Image: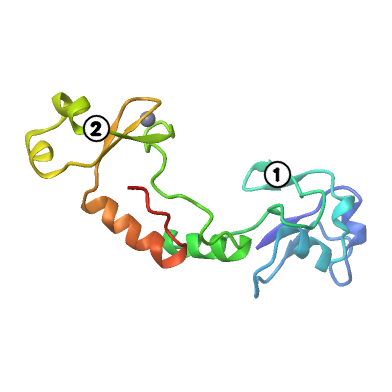
Amino acid sequence: MIINFWGNLKELLWPPFRGQKRVEYDLTRQASVKDIIEALGVPHTEVGRLIVAGQEISFSPCGCNDPNPYLVREIYPERQLAEIVHLFGIKGQFKPLSRCLRCNGLLQPVGKEEIIEQLEPLTKKYYDSFRQCLGCGKIYWPGTHRDKMLLVLNRYGDYHALD
Ligand SMILES: [Zn+2]
């Protein structure tokens, strides 16, 4: 990865990087941005602004459980999920499929009879368990897409049953 140091920060870098604005850093292990910057000699408290991929982010004030700025190294979405779950120790703490894909509203179980008018004929015929978004009203039911997603999520975090 490439890190650019502005202002006086360049002078805090260890040799041989001292005075260089642009430092190339080999990512050989999992590390937060804070760890990397400190490994190069710059105390993170000296850093005024931290910009990653064009967006300003902040260090957490203490080094405890708050998520630090972190560079995800995996390329594929499934492995990125595993990396994040592992890093922050949040296995079993998230509830997949509890929110609407369209508006992020909370989903709530809804009786089939309440929404039967809105269902396609085959959905009406084959499904009995439905949930509806409290935000936009979109209706969800167990389907093959959902099963595939749960398979992926189950591999990396304990899935909290929703039904
Ligand atoms: Zn919604």
Q: Residue lying at the far bottom in this picture: please name it.
A: 28
Q: Amino acid at mark 1?
A: Ile
Tell me residue 111's x, y (percent): 24, 32
Assess whether mark 1 and mark 2 are in contact (beta carbons under 8 angstroms).
no
Tell me residue 90's x, y (percent): 57, 59
Mark 2 = which residue?
111
> Of circles 2 and 1, which is in front?
2
What colour scheme does the image use? rainbow
Residue 42 position (above or below residue 105) = below
Task: Classify residue 11 as left or right of residue 146.
Answer: right
Q: Earlier in the sequence, mark 2 or mark 1?
A: 1
Ligand 1 quadrant assignment: top left
Q: Nearer the viewer, residue 124 or 61?
A: 124
Badge 2: how crowded within 10 Å, few (<14), some, or many (20+)? few
Label 2: element kind? loop
Q: Amino acid at mark 2?
A: Gly
Label 1: element kind? strand
Tell me residue 51's x, y (percent): 71, 46
Task: Classify residue 100 as left or right of residue 41.
Answer: left
> Which residue is depicted at the point 41% across and 39% down?
99
Res. 57 mark: 1
> Which residue is depicted at the point 75% across and 64% down?
36
